[in-house]
Image: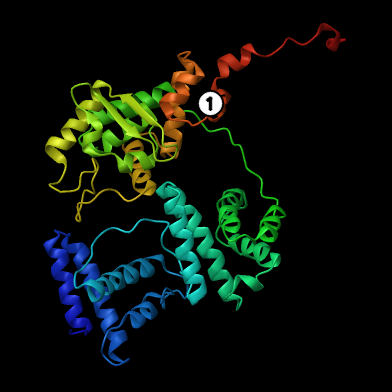
Amino acid sequence: MDTTVTHLGSVVVAALRAANYMESTIGNYQKTIRLLDDYVAVRGGEYSPSLGAEFAALTTSPRTGRFSAVRRFNYTRLVALFDSYLRSGEVVLARRKRGGGGRQPASVGFIELNASWEADMADRGLAVATREAYGRIARGYLVYLEDQGITSLDVADPATVTGFFTSLLDRWAQSSLFWQVSNFRPFLKFIGRNDLVEAVNLIGARRSHPILPDLGDEEVTRVVQACASLPRISSRDAAITLLSLMTGLRACDLVDLRIDDIDWRGQTVSIVQQKTKNPVTLPLPGLLAAKLADYVLAERPDSDDDHVFLRSVAPYTGLVDHASIYKVTDETFRKAGVTDVRAGTRLLRHAAASRLLRAATPLPTIAAVLGHASQESTNVYLSVDEKRLRECVLPVPKRAWS
């Protein structure tokens, strides 16, 4: 096989054009191909995965001397396509999910351990998002150990755990450590290291309980009207936003929604939620059903993929993860003129629950609509029912005034 960058690059570009990628995107690939060609030319002229990894690691901009996310993205995606062709004889254009990236362990023992951990999570039927979160923090710890010259868990002591979490503060906020600790414990229990579990407990990460902002009726009305009438909001983006706002569906369930999940005659959507594994059937109000129909019949690209929501540019595959949904909902809010909130699905689920609560809907019903595994998860929404909270305030005893 011809493994020159020129040949491999021509194969990749042909695959991109066949998949209807925009010429501007192909142009960015071609620019990176030229840079890779220059890099490989002085190192023997033949591309290999190891040279590709070296090239992808060049994430420092020569202009600024600082890390460049653009360089990392462009270099990594090209190398992935080259490697997929060398590995399978086909340029694999499938989108990679977030959460599965980052550095991978390099030592044989840690590679095998990581594979065993991934297999164990899959065997237990953990949700994909959960496996990604657990796997990411476990890989991070193994890579941290390798950076310290440790390639066996037998010599990893509790200090490596506290040191690892200290290193996370370079890129994670202190308030995020609770979730990282929570995601890390299952891995430590899997490897049977109770001493490391106890070290995690010493970190003292505390869960924050912020009161989420609530969307006012005026803001909700503005967004709904924009979804109904603004031409610059596509049917896909309107349907995603309205689904989240009106039904409170999680981002992972919006991403995984399939054509067969929709009952068009009954105007309902029925799914098994990824997070709780609970089945739920939700009504589709008229506007939402109309936008979904507009998207499926007139706007949705032709594709064998049975996901309801597909990418709007090639490759026409399902959306990747919660970040894709956030981009859609946030941009829709911006176009509707609601700019003072971060309009992710967490806020929109919160807004859906708050409206149900204000309508005197019983908590068990709200829990069922939102798909909570426990009614206690729904109690957080009581914090925004200001009217009923005021009714709970006791009068100040007269004696206290004297």
Q: Which residue lies furthest to the top in this view?
A: 398
Q: How is the image coloured?
A: rainbow
Residue 234 placement, left or right of 339: left
Q: Pointer 1: residues within 10 angstroms few (<14), some, or many (20+)? A: some
Q: Residue at x 45, y 74 (%)?
A: 64
Q: Where is residue 34 in the image (x, y as percent from the top left)?
A: 24, 79
Quarter placement of the N terminus: bottom left
Q: Which of 113 and 230 is in front in this view?
A: 113
Q: Where is residue 186 in the image (x, y as percent from the top left)?
A: 57, 53
What residue is disc 1 on?
375
Residue 356 placement, left or right of 49: right
Q: How many marks?
A: 1
Q: Where is residue 97 in the image (x, y as percent from the top left)?
A: 35, 56
Tag 1, which secondary structure?
helix
Q: Is residue 84 above or below residue 119?
A: below
Q: Position of residue 25 (x, y in %)?
A: 22, 63
Q: In this view, does 113 lie above or below 229?
A: below
Q: Which of 274 and 77 is in front in this view?
A: 274
Regarding residue 232, the answer to whether it shows in the image is no
Q: Is residue 196 above or below residue 205?
A: below
Q: Residue furthest right?
A: 402
- The picture quadrant where one finds residue 211 is top right
User: Which amino acid type is marked by label 1?
Assistant: Gln
Q: Which residue is drawn at 66% across and 45% down?
A: 206
Q: Is residue 70 above or below residue 228?
A: below
